[in-house]
Amino acid sequence: MTPLSWILVCSVVGFLLLATEVFVPGLILGMLGLLSLIIAAGIAYTAYGAMTGSLVLAGLGLVTIIGFIAWMIIFPSTPIGRRIMLRSNLDPGEGNKRAPAADVIGRQGIALTPLRPAGTALIEGRRMDVVAENAFITKDSPIVVVLQEGLRIVVRETSLPQHPVNTPRDRKGGIQSKSAQEG
């Protein structure tokens, strides 16, 4: 094969490997494609001199940039592109997990799933992601919220009735102990 044939083969293989990198992520195919393009430019430098080598290198760079821009314009409208890419934009704040009510400490509920240690609970009619304080809690067990740190809600199993009536609460919303109630 002539040096020109090797330049063309390495260039085509390099561009195909770069295009394949989109569908098979991992950077290996992309790096092999880039290496193939560098080899094509290297063959041009050694076989035809500095002027031709520089023209081949500039041409490969230009074709790569134009190909990338064309790919970004055309790909989203292809059947595969429509399946892979996001169709609509999210407004700021949309899609963020809604924070639970600020005063859930001391509130009671029921475990909807086993908490080992994380799971879902129904607390005052709202489904919430919760974490068990220190032990496995079985499904349908009564629970009480003992701590809240941002979106993290920590619960413990309780034997109290599900909806206590007139339970005194401290300033932070927690249920007061008997000694605090008396004093």
Image (spheres, rainbow, N blue to C red):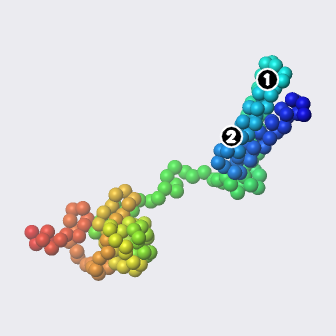
Secondary element under disc 2, as helix, strand or loop, is helix
Q: Is residue 163 above or below residue 25?
A: below
The residue where tag 2 is placed is 31
The residue where tag 1 is placed is 45
Say left or right for 71 vs 177.
right
Q: Given the image, on which type of amino acid does mark 2 rest?
A: Met
* Other-residue count near label 1 (Cα within 10 Å), few / some / many at <14 / 14–19 / ≥20: some
- Location of the C terminus (image quadrant): bottom left
| Location of residue 134 in the rendering, given as x and y in whole percent from the top left corner | 32, 68
Q: Nearer the viewer, residue 138 or 42?
A: 42
Q: Nearer the viewer, residue 155 or 28?
A: 28
Residue at position x 49%, y 56% in the image: 96
Q: Quadrant of residue 8?
A: top right
Residue 151 in view of the camera:
yes
* Other-residue count near label 2 (Cα within 10 Å), few / some / many at <14 / 14–19 / ≥20: some
Residue at position x 40%, y 75% in the image: 111
Q: Is residue 126 above or below residue 34?
A: below
Q: Quadrant of residue 115?
A: bottom left
Q: Quadrant of residue 74?
A: top right
Which label was assigned to residue 32?
A: none
Q: Given the image, on which type of amino acid does mark 1 rest?
A: Tyr
Residue at position x 42%, y 67% in the image: 118
Say left or right for 69 vs 104.
right
- Location of the N terminus (image quadrant): top right
Dots 2, 1 in contact, CB < 8 A: no
Mark closer to the chain start, 2 or 1: 2
| Location of residue 179 in the rendering, given as x and y in whole percent from the top left corner | 12, 71
Q: Nearer the viewer, residue 114 or 16?
A: 16
| Location of residue 169 in the rendering, given as x and y in whole percent from the top left corner | 22, 68
Considering every residue shown, the one lying at the far right of the view is: 1
